[in-house]
Image (cartoon, helix red, strand yellow):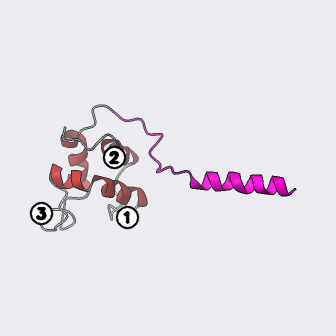
Amino acid sequence: MVVVSCLLISILAVISCSKNDGTSNITCDPATSFANTVKPILDKSCNMNGCHDDIVITALNNFQTVHDGANQIKISIQSGRMPKSNSLTTAEKNAIYCWVDNGAKNN
């Protein structure tokens, strides 16, 4: 009984330590690009009315700023913190995740 309990606890510990950020099963479209995919999504959902436009320090309206914060942007979307309006579709979220996971290139 003790052996079974120890085995069960060990299995649970290993399972709880595995990390899945929720994007491992996403199929990425090779055509996903900053200019044609990511920027239009950010313009529609983030770069408006004082959110992340030219008025604020964390403007998301140019490649360098978005690239520098790419991982944090992904985390903010995954956690539901951003966008505040929760206006991104699953496809839009996945496109951003793919772009970040593939190196957040200026393409």
Coordinates of residue 62 in the picture (x, y in percent):
14, 52
Tell me how far mark 1 sits from mark 2, CA to CA: 15 Å
Is tag 3's residue or tag 1's residue first in the polypeptide sequence? 3
> For numbered disc 1, what is the local secondary structure?
loop
Question: Which residue in the structure is indicated by mark 3?
Answer: 54
Q: Which mark is residue 92?
A: 2
The verdict on residue 18 being magenta is: yes
Question: Which residue in the structure is indicated by mark 1?
Answer: 81
Give the farthest residue toward the left: 54
Q: Which residues are magenta?
A: 1-29
Coordinates of residue 92 in the picture (x, y in percent):
33, 46
Instruction: Report the number of discs.
Output: 3
CB-based contact (under 8 Å), mark 2 and mark 3: no
Q: Nearer the viewer, mark 1 or mark 2?
A: 1
Q: Amino acid at mark 1?
A: Arg
> For numbered disc 2, what is the local secondary structure?
helix
CB-based contact (under 8 Å), mark 1 and mark 2: no
Frontmost residue, 100 versus 4: 4
Q: Amino acid at mark 3?
A: Asp
The quadrant of the rendering that contains the N terminus is bottom right
Frontmost residue, 72 versus 81: 72
Q: Nearer the viewer, mark 2 or mark 3?
A: 3
Q: Amino acid at mark 2?
A: Glu
Vertical placement of residue 23 versus 6, above or below: above
Residue at 33% x, 65% y is 84
Tell me how far mark 3 sits from mark 1, CA to CA: 21 Å
> For numbered disc 3, what is the local secondary structure?
loop
Coordinates of residue 85 in the picture (x, y in percent):
33, 63
